[in-house]
C-alpha cells in the first residue's frame, strides 16, 4: 500500500533549501555525482532526494535536519531513494549496504508517495541487474517487488 505524504509549504521549502545546501557543499568539495548520474543533473537530484527524505521523516514523525552526514543514514536508520517517476524503480548499487532498509519515494511538487522498501541484500539479485538509463547497470527493483510500507523497521538512532 502506498503512503502519500504532502509537505506543508514550510516543510517543502526546508527540503528545497537542504537539497541546495547539499549541492553547494558537494560542489565546494569537488564531489562528483554518484550512481553514474550526469553532472548537469546534480542540482535536481539533490533536491529530489531531500524532498523524499523529508516526506519519509514526516510519515515516521521524526525530526529531519536536512543536512545530515555525508554517506550517513537519511532518516533515522533508513536509506531513502527518491525519483520523479511515478512508476520508478528502487535503484541500488553494488556498494549499498546489505543490512540497511532502503525506501522508495516517488516525489512531485512537495508530495511524496512512499511505495515500499527492502533490505539492500534483497535487492542485490542478478535478476534486478539492468542498464535502464544513461547511468550504467545497477539494481532496478520494481515497485511490485517491494515490501509494504507498514512493515518498515525503524530506529530513530
Image (cartoon, rainbow, N blue to C red):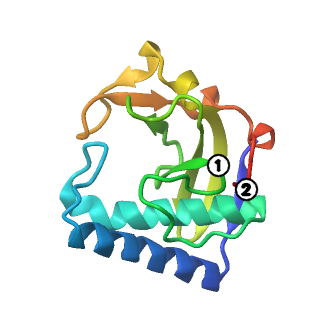
Residue on which disc 1 sits: 77
User: In terms of secondary structure, where does tag 1 sit?
Assistant: loop
The quadrant of the image that shows the C terminus is bottom right
Q: Which residue: 18% across, 64% down?
A: 30
Q: Residue at x 74, y 65 (%)?
A: 62
Please give the residue where the numbered disc 2 appears in the rendered image: 156
Q: Quadrant of residue 148?
A: top right
List x then y, in percent, for residue 21. 39, 76
Work out which quarter of the rendered image holds the N terminus and state it.
top right
Give the CA distance from mark 2 to mark 1: 6 Å
- Whole-percent x, y for residue 46 in the image: 39, 64
Query: Measured from the top left, where is residue 11 in percent x and y?
Result: 62, 79
User: Residue 5: x percent and y percent?
Assistant: 70, 63
Determine whether, in the image, residue 15 is placed left or right of residue 144: left
**Contact, mark 2 vs mark 1 (Cβ under 8 Å):** yes
Q: Residue furthest right?
A: 150
Instruction: Using the image, determine if residue 23 lies above or below residue 143.
Output: below
Amino acid at each position: 500500500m502506498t503512503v502519500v505524504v504532502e509537505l506543508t509549504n514550510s516543510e517543502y521549502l526546508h527540503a528545497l533549501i537542504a537539497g541546495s545546501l547539499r549541492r553547494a557543499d558537494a560542489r565546494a568539495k569537488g564531489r562528483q555525482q554518484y550512481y553514474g548520474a550526469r553532472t548537469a543533473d546534480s542540482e535536481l537530484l539533490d533536491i529530489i532526494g531531500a524532498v523524499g527524505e523529508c516526506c519519509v521523516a514526516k510519515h515516521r514523525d521524526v525530526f529531519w535536519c536536512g543536512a545530515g552526514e555525508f554517506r550517513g543514514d537519511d532518516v533515522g536508520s533508513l536509506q531513502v531513494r527518491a525519483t520523479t517517476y511515478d512508476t520508478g524503480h528502487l535503484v541500488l548499487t553494488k556498494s549499498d549496504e546489505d543490512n540497511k532498509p532502503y525506501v522508495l519515494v516517488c516525489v512531485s511538487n512537495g508530495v511524496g508517495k512512499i511505495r515500499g522498501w527492502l533490505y539492500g541484500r534483497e535487492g542485490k539479485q542478478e535478476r534486478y541487474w539492468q542498464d535502464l538509463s544513461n547511468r550504467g547497470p545497477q539494481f532496478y527493483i520494481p515497485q511490485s517487488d517491494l515490501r509494504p510500507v507498514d512493515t518498515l523497521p525503524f530506529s530513530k538512532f
